[in-house]
Amino acid sequence: MFEVKHRDGLARICSFETAHGTVETPAVMPVINPNKLVAPPKKLKEQFGAQIIITNSYVIKQSEELREKALKDGLHEMLDFDGPIMTDSGTFQAYVYGSVDTNPEEILKFQKDIGSDIITILDRFTEPEDNKELVEEKVRDTIQRAEDAVEEYGRSETHLSLPIQGSIFTELRKDAAEGISKLDAKAVYPIGGVVPLMEDYRFKDLAEVIIASKKGLGPKGPVHLFGAGHPMIFSLAVLLGCDMFDSSSYIKYARRGDFMFPTGTRKLEHTYEITCDCPSCNGRSVEDFRGMDEDERTKLIAEHNLRQMFIEIRRIKQAIRDGSLWELVERRCRSHPQLYEVYEILKKRWRFLELYEPRSRKSALMYTGRETLDRPAVKRVQRWIMNEYQPHFDEPTFLFKVNENEKPYNRHLMFEISEIFKRTEADLLLSTPIGPVPMELDEIYPIAQSIFPRGMRDEELVNEYLEKKGIDDLLVWDGIESLSSVENGSSGNLDVMRVKTVANYQFGKGAGEVLTDGQLRFVKNRKGRVKNVILDDEHILSVRHYDGFFTLKTEGAEILKDHFQAPYLRVKVDDDSAEFNRKGRNVFSKFVLNVDEDLRPGDEALIVDKNDNMVAVGRMFLAKDEILEYDTGMAVRVREGIEK
Amino acid sequence: MFEVKHRDGLARICSFETAHGTVETPAVMPVINPNKLVAPPKKLKEQFGAQIIITNSYVIKQSEELREKALKDGLHEMLDFDGPIMTDSGTFQAYVYGSVDTNPEEILKFQKDIGSDIITILDRFTEPEDNKELVEEKVRDTIQRAEDAVEEYGRSETHLSLPIQGSIFTELRKDAAEGISKLDAKAVYPIGGVVPLMEDYRFKDLAEVIIASKKGLGPKGPVHLFGAGHPMIFSLAVLLGCDMFDSSSYIKYARRGDFMFPTGTRKLEHTYEITCDCPSCNGRSVEDFRGMDEDERTKLIAEHNLRQMFIEIRRIKQAIRDGSLWELVERRCRSHPQLYEVYEILKKRWRFLELYEPRSRKSALMYTGRETLDRPAVKRVQRWIMNEYQPHFDEPTFLFKVNENEKPYNRHLMFEISEIFKRTEADLLLSTPIGPVPMELDEIYPIAQSIFPRGMRDEELVNEYLEKKGIDDLLVWDGIESLSSVENGSSGNLDVMRVKTVANYQFGKGAGEVLTDGQLRFVKNRKGRVKNVILDDEHILSVRHYDGFFTLKTEGAEILKDHFQAPYLRVKVDDDSAEFNRKGRNVFSKFVLNVDEDLRPGDEALIVDKNDNMVAVGRMFLAKDEILEYDTGMAVRVREGIEK
């Protein structure tokens, strides 16, 4: 039902089916006021690309005319829209007006009766001002109502919308999300009660709330950020794992003459230039907008605002497929200083984000400012070098201050490396923008696949490294004379060091040793770069040209399997699947029994059967908890099956 | 001829006249290939808003057919364009192909003959690889050719285009610009030889070259960044004082299937989503673009690219009028790490930028990252506090750690201030995101008119301040008990401190003392905020509600004039002007004899006649060197004339 098609960290392009068609997420749902259609839903679909809309069932129910029409003709006919429609329940009205004239059962049944595709329970809106006790009570009630709804409608065609409440208490949010996620239903998971946070620009709190909810929800989806309608925050929310947005703000803002942009809002009265070429804006001047009839202006600005939302969603999807969503978010967060505050949370919560973080991306990591250095992709490799990496020799360490425009660094240091290695086995250390990097790691993502400003270095981290590794015998490379004090000994070999270190980083401690334990030989390309690693005449590893990591050949995989005890590096499948995987077919989530918790999307995985017999080697597409959660979709892309 | 209409620092919205109409800058000139019109110039004007186009006279001259047509019908008829046309001379062809089949006289005469509105001399292209001697020679030749051109065409209707060369030698660029700027002609000033820098993303060098050229050129304009056609760098170039751009890249990129955006370029082959709603993109899918005929695709993408340029120019104009251009540049510079490197230059050259920097802006300063702290607007007030500000008392200094969302700070500290001032006269210091700020300055730009992330503080700067001012007796405010050790003495008055300190910052050392030397009285608004300052029953100052600075009443101005010797704070006008200014009419550049070098755009100025008699009080619109340079336009907006 909910299938991941593309992903980057927690961000994902997914699809799910409704009775009125497929929705591809991330998606923004225009809010339709059933009393006053500013833009006809049909037009939103045809001209703006809206896949799904949302309207308020409580507003319909309260109007005799609308209620009878909706009950008689159905919601889709009433709104003249043949795509999926989600309905809200009146929760927000209860928050704004204090109470509503309905109850959980009635409003749910009404939504079902008028033919809504996604029906929302009447949850209890948790406000930032609520004290903890009240929030606990509201969360309990909300979960209870969700349980009742699942009991009543859990087996129907209709999706349930089961909001997560909890105000700004992150533990309560997590608990609420866990409570909701346990329920077995075809559902959408809104994160509710966040409108006051967004209205007050409390984006830091918003980010914490999303993260806490995602922790509790796990990979369940689609996750809907209820009431989020400013394109400024879409990319951040998607980065943190949200899939859906809804917005009535496009109209509200338009009524005030406010043009929305992903970088903020601009009032017509402060507008001197029309900085947009969308069909509403193109060819129109500021004077045109000022001079026109108010209804016409509201309509045009509302359409402009909607288009900005849809475009931002498309930018986000493009960025997910590019692997550049972090860059987009880092730029967007500079739209307002209170959005910038979110960095603090991204930095603080990097360990959670790292669980979904691919070890490599399609496009280079681009520096946008010092905040880039706090990304999980950077922290992970920094930490590994600092805490896990073992220098190879007791001999001196040579330190090179490298240049950003000379990457991969080793290819610009070929003379220096060869001169050193003629005389001695030595560790070679690079002082880079992300701190110390052993030369052997200099071709892997993101070390080679990144662009930083030239001249950037983190020398403090280099010093920390030297101290931590107890390196006293440091020689800072400064031309060939740096070698004058070196005594001739055995000669070094960077290729061997590279295999050991990359394997240890990629597969875990000790992998480098077992994968080189024997007669080692390399197949190189014309430029002298290692393509294949041959151990005792068996091709065990290939080097991926685009990110410097290894792909496992079955012989290499067998070595790792012998070395590492189950469940490490394994994806365990049931017997039916094993048969197919042996033939080289991909592993589907449904048939997976267990996944090692250290495996990340994009990692090499050993596919094993119940008895830990290896049946195939492949590459993780999903994260562990996604595989275990989802019933549909590919989990591991198999590269080689192992016939019995 | 060249008139500044709006400005923000070195950035400006200007206009200049040509024989074929007015051009408003910043402007981008689409490059028209006379051999192959991808989009008809007429369409560019009508549908895209192109005010001016540029084409290559050498290319026309080399084609017999085009040459004869151009000579017979004129350039405007040949291109079917009735707006201004600038022509290039073949310099770039000489750079690309080594030589050209023309000479400086011939190509200039040809441009004149075919009726170009702006004719470019055949300057000598300086390349980044050229050695200094060669660059010197090329600069000399270029200046010589400019002199010859001015002699021949300086008094004609046609504008001359006189490029500044000098490669990456900033001193040579400055000298070249000075040499060119001395020539008395109706001219456009291209910064030439920068295409190789832009092609190699050497934006740091580019920024240095622009700054050096601007230093030499002074306020002359329009300044044209020759060959700059990527919208990614427009905002930076405008911030540094460039007015015009030209681009053939919109077509070149389109031929390769490259979509330009102000944040970078995206290849069609890597495009999964169309992230634009311009008339070329709206309603088209990636598949549509991939499937269409190549000519059609090139045309559509070229039009998209052009639209992106025009929109970015409009965004820049909007930002200049908003006072938010720095924010735009800080966001744009994160489009590529090598564009980010430009910050280093903006930081290094802040003293030059500060000469044009207004003391206040219409919109709040918005933090986009730590780079914001290096803006001239921030540095100026930081430096003044650190180096010029004198604490008032020997009594203790109270330090407050303030919150960003409680601004102006003093209004959230009214209780604390009143409790302190009941007991003692004390200095009140705020620890803010920009470092230490005396409480009395907390309502001026950018201290109150700024938004920073909450919780930001620069405590290092606070410590530096305490040491510098020799403050030992520091009490960090921590509730009312902070007062327990305070002995009761005289009571403090923040309003008096504010008048003194703001006046010293705004008008110079000693201003605060002379403006408060007598019987001081305040007129306050309903909220208790000072509106007017009355000294010995004379209304001397009013407080600007939006930025906390003073406007000078004539009585206040007289006090300052008596205190500060000429030419300080003065704009000296000739007798004809003086007559008019006494009647309250604005000061026009043409009639200004001298301007104090400390006056910045937006500053209060004393208008005096040749004998230093004050004739009016007003507010600077232009910078000093602009006033002295320009023959047209307003220099100072007069608020009060002083009748004899």
Image (cartoon, coloured by chain):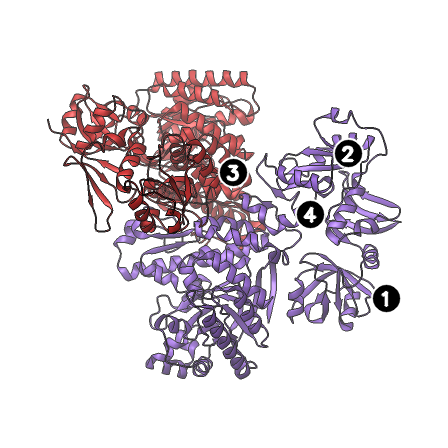
Chain colours: A purple, B red
Residue at the spot of label 3: B339
The numbered mark at residue A644 is: 1
Q: Chain of mark 4?
A: A
Q: Position of residue A414 (x, y in %)?
A: 74, 33
Give the residue at the far left of this rendering: B644
Spatial distance from mark 4 to mark 2, Cα to Cα?
A: 29 Å
Residue at the spot of label 2: A396
Q: Chain of mark 3?
A: B
Task: Please name which of the two marks, 1 or 2, marks the residue nearer to the observer.
Answer: 2
* Amino acid type, callout 2: Pro
B294 to the left or right of A430? left
- What secondary structure is found at the residue carrying circle 3? helix
Task: Please name which of the two marks, 1 or 3, marks the residue nearer to the observer.
Answer: 3
Residue at the spot of label 4: A547
Spatial distance from mark 1 to mark 2, Cα to Cα?
A: 49 Å
To the question of a shared chain for discs 3 and 2, the answer is no
* Amino acid type, callout 4: Asp
* Amino acid type, callout 1: Lys
Q: Position of residue B247 (x, y in %)?
A: 46, 37
* Amino acid type, callout 3: Leu
- What secondary structure is found at the residue carrying circle 2? loop
To the question of a shared chain for discs 4 and 3, the answer is no
Spatial distance from mark 1 to mark 3, Cα to Cα?
A: 56 Å
- What secondary structure is found at the residue carrying circle 1? loop
Spatial distance from mark 4 to mark 3, Cα to Cα?
A: 25 Å
Spatial distance from mark 3 to mark 2, Cα to Cα?
A: 38 Å
